[in-house]
């Protein structure tokens, strides 16, 4: 493992603690059928804490190797991802949850795992439909429908 992995894992664990304190201010809910607004952040933070802990343990095991990460040659993919995250919040009220999630996933699949366009479009479609099934149908969260009503 890289020494930078230990640093990143430590930062993620601090992130988990800080956001976890804030997430406990929201009700979690009584059951899996009636979850509160604090349930989803706590579940995500729990997964992040587990994976960060594993990364920290693995990187501490190989600490003596003194390996360093190589910086990428281009920051363009990271900039595209960050800009698309900000654009998601701005576009959501106009396009609605389904279309915004589709286009956001399309950009991430295109930049993160560039393969054939059919696979990219299919992955974005499956991701957006699963997001609608989980959040709108199962959790009954109301998202903006957008100007065209989707």
Image (cartoon, helix red, strand yellow):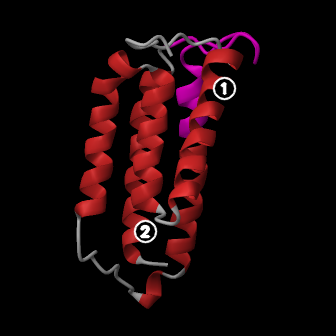
Q: Magenta segment range?
A: 26-46
Q: Residue furthest bottom?
A: 65
Secondary structure of the residue carrying numbered label 1: helix
What's the residue at 27%, 76% (across, down)?
71
Q: Nearer the viewer, residue 11 or 98?
A: 98
Residue nearer the viewer, 16 or 149: 149
Asked if labels 1 and 2 touch by Cβ distance under 8 angstroms, the answer is: no
Q: Residue 74's x, y, as percent?
A: 23, 71
- Reply above or below: 62 against 114: below
Residue 9 visible in the current orientation:
no
Q: Position of residue 105 (x, y in %)?
A: 47, 43
Is the residue marked by circle 1 packed among few (<14), some (14-19), or many (20+) residues within 10 Å?
Answer: few
Mark seen at residue 134: 1
Label 2, residues with CA under 10 Å away: few <14, some 14-19, many ≥20: many
Residue 129 placement, left or right of 77: right
Secondary structure at numbered mark 2: helix
**Residue at image mark 2:** 5
Q: Is residue 142 above or below residue 129?
A: above
């Amino acid at each position: 493992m890289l020494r930078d992995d230990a640093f990143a894992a430590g930062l993620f664990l601090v992130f988990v603690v800080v956001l976890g304190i804030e997430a406990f201010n929201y009700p979690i809910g009584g059951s899996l059928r009636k979850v509160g607004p604090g349930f989803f952040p706590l579940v995500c933070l729990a997964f992040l804490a587990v994976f960060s802990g594993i990364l920290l343990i693995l990187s501490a095991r190989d600490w003596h190797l003194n390996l360093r990460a190589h910086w990428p040659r281009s920051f363009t993919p990271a900039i595209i991802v960050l800009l698309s995250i900000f654009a998601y919040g701005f576009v959501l009220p106009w396009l609605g949850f389904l279309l915004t999630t589709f286009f956001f996933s399309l950009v991430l699949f295109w930049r993160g795992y560039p393969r054939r366009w059919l696979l990219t479009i299919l992955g974005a479609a499956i991701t957006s439909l699963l997001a609608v099934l989980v959040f709108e149908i199962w959790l009954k969260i109301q998202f903006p429908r957008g100007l065209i009503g989707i």
